[in-house]
Amino acid sequence: MAMIDEPLYPIAVLIDELKNEDIQLRLNSIRKLSTIARALGEERTRKELIPFLSENNDDDDEVLLAMAEELGVFIPYVGGVEYANVLLPPLETLCIVEETCVRDKAVESLCRVGAQMREQDLVEFFIPMLKRLAAGEWFTARVSSCGLFHIAYPSAPEALKTELRTIYSQLCQDDMPMVRRSAATNLGKFAATIEGPHLKVDIMPMFNDLTQDDQDSVRLLAVEGCAALGKLLEPQDCVAHILPVIVSFSQDKSWRVRYMVANQLYELCEAVGPEPTRSDLVPAYVRLLRDNEAEVRIAAAGKVTKFCRILNSELAIQNILPCVKELSTDSSQHVRSALASVIMGMAPILGKDATIEQLLPIFLSLLKDEFPDVRLNIISKLDQVNQVIGIDLLSQSLLPAIVELAEDRHWRVRLAIIEYIPLLASQLGVGFFDDKLGALCMQWLKDKVYSIRDAAANNVKRLAEEFGPEWALQHIVPQVLDMINNPHYLYRMTILQAISLLAPVMGAEITCSNLLPVVINASKDRVPNIKFNVAKVLQSLIPIVDQSVVEKTIRPCLVELSEDPDVDVRFFAAQALQSSDQLTMMSS
C-alpha cells in the first residue's frame, strides 16, 4: 500500500503547502517545483501539476513571481520542446495579474518558452494566446501582449503576420496609456523581426503615432525607439523619418522627454550618422546643454565628451565649448559634477593648443569648486590632460590647486588626492615629487580621520614601489620612523601599519637594520593597543627576515608580550608565536 501511495506523496505535500496560510511555506513549495516535477515524472507533471498551477492564481504576489520564474525553465520537466505548449496556460494567467513585476516575469518566461517552441506549435498555441491577451478586456493583458510579438512574428504565415501588425498598430492607439507605453517600449524589438518593406509602411506610422502621444510617459519611451528604428532603416530613410522626430523631441514641452533625448543622444547620433549630426543635432544638443531644467543639463553635460568625438575639433570649439564654459559655473552643483566627470576626455579631442587656452581655465575653476564631488571628479581624470599638454604645464597650472585640495576640509577629497598621488608621482618624476608632494604625504599620516591615515600608509608603500627601496630609505623611512614618538597613540599605530606595509618592499636587510628596532622599541609602549599591534607587525615580519633574527630578536619580544597583563596583547602575541613555530617547522 505504501508503495502505491508514494508517487502521490510529493503532489499531496505541494498542494497542502500551496494552500498553507504561511507565505514562506507556499514560497518554498513553489521554488521546489522542479524537484516535485522530477518526482512525479513528465506525464503526471503535464496532467496534474501544470493544471493545478493554472488554477492557483489567487495568491500572494511573491509566490506568483516565483511561479512565473520557475515555469520559464520548465520545458525539460514536461517532456521537452514538443510539450512546451502546456506551460502557456499558467503563464497566460500570470500575464493578467495586477502586480507589474509578476506580469513582467511571466512575459520573460513566455519569451523563453516561445523561443524554444517548434514553429507549428507557435502557430497553433502561442499566437492564439497572444491574440487573446491583445484583445483582453483588462488592460494588464494588453500590456503583457506587447512583449510577445517579437517571438511570435517570425514563425507566423504571411496572413497571420499581417494580422499581427494590425493588432500591434491597435495597441499603439489603445485608450489606456499603460498599454501605449508597453507598445512604445517593445516597438524596437518587434520592428527588428519585420521585413524591410513593411518597416516603412506599417511600423513608421505606429512610431509616428507614439511620438505625438499626449502622454509624456509614452513619448519618452518613443525616444528609445528612435535609436532602435534608426539602426534598422536605410540611412536616407533614417534622416527623413527619425531625425525630425529627434529634433522635435529635443524641444518637447515635457522636461522628461528632453532628459531622455539628452541621455540617449549618442545612440541617436550613431543611428542618423555623422553628417546629419553635425548639421541638425548640434543645435539640438546646444539647446539641451542650455535647458532650463537642471536634470536635462546634467544628462546633456554627462555626454559632452562622447558627443564631441563625433564632431571635428573645430565644430566642438565653436559650438560646444561656449556651453561647457557656462556649465562650469552652473547654479546646480550636480550639473557641474556631471561636467567634471567627463570634461577631461575633451582634451585629446580638442588638441594641445585649445586645451591650454580654453579647457585649462575651466579645469581650474572646477578644481576650486565649493562642492567636493566636483573637485573629486576632476582629480581622478587628470592623466587624460597630462597626455595632451605635458607634465610641465600641468604642474605649473594644476599643482597649486592640488596642494590646496590636499588640505581640503572634506576628508573624501583628501582621500581622492592621496589615491591619486602614486599616479601623479609616476607622471611627475622623482625630482618634482620630492620638491612639491613629499611633505604632503607625511602630513597625511597625522590626519585626524582614520581613513586618511590608512590610505596614507598605503600611499607610502606604493611610493616605495614606484621609486625603489633606495629612494624610500632616504626620503620616506626616516620621516616615518620619527613619528613613532608622537604623543597620540593612534598616530603611533598608523606608523606601525606603515612599517608592516613597507617591510616587504624594502627587503630583509633594511627591515632588520631600520624598521625592526623601532617595532621592538614600541613593544614597551604603555598603551595595550600599540603592544598588540606590535605583535601583529612582528608576525608579518617573520617571513621577511632571516630565521636567526626571528630567534634572537622577534621571539624574545613576543614571549615577553605573551605574559602581558592585557588579554588582547597576550592573544596576539601567542598567535604570532604559533605562526613563527609553523614557519620554523616548514623550513626545517
Image: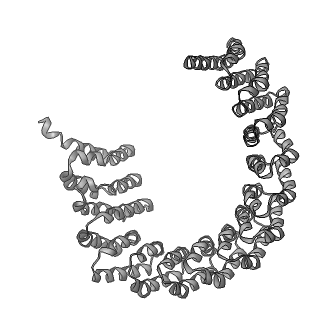
Horizontal placement of 2 versus 108: left or right? left
Q: Residue at x 80, y 49 (%)?
A: 429
Residue 376 percent coordinates (x, y): 75, 55
Q: Is residue 153 left or right of residue 483?
A: left
Tell me where residue 275 sits by quadrant: bottom right
Q: Nearer the viewer, residue 492 or 104?
A: 492
Say which quadrant the C terminus sits in: top right
Q: Quadrant of the N terminus?
A: top left
Residue at the (50%, 80%) spot, across then down: 210
Give the tally of numbered discs: 0
Q: Tell me: residue 35, above or below residue 89.
A: above
Q: Judge whether residue 179 can be spotted in this image.
A: no
Which colour scheme appears in the figure? one colour
Q: Is residue 236 above or below residue 68?
A: below
Q: Quadrant of residue 39?
A: top left
Can the viewer see residue 70 in this picture? yes
Seen in the image, is 315 located left or right of residue 159? right
Q: Position of residue 59 (x, y in %)?
A: 36, 54
Between 588 and 415, which is closer to the camera in this rendering?
Answer: 588
- Above or below, comparing residue 356 to residue 510 in the picture: below
| Percent coordinates x, y for residue 519 in the rendering | 76, 23
Front-most of 174 and 434? 434
Q: Position of residue 557 (x, y in %)?
A: 72, 15
Residue displayed at 41% across by 83% down? 196
Residue at x 63% of width, y 75% of height: 258
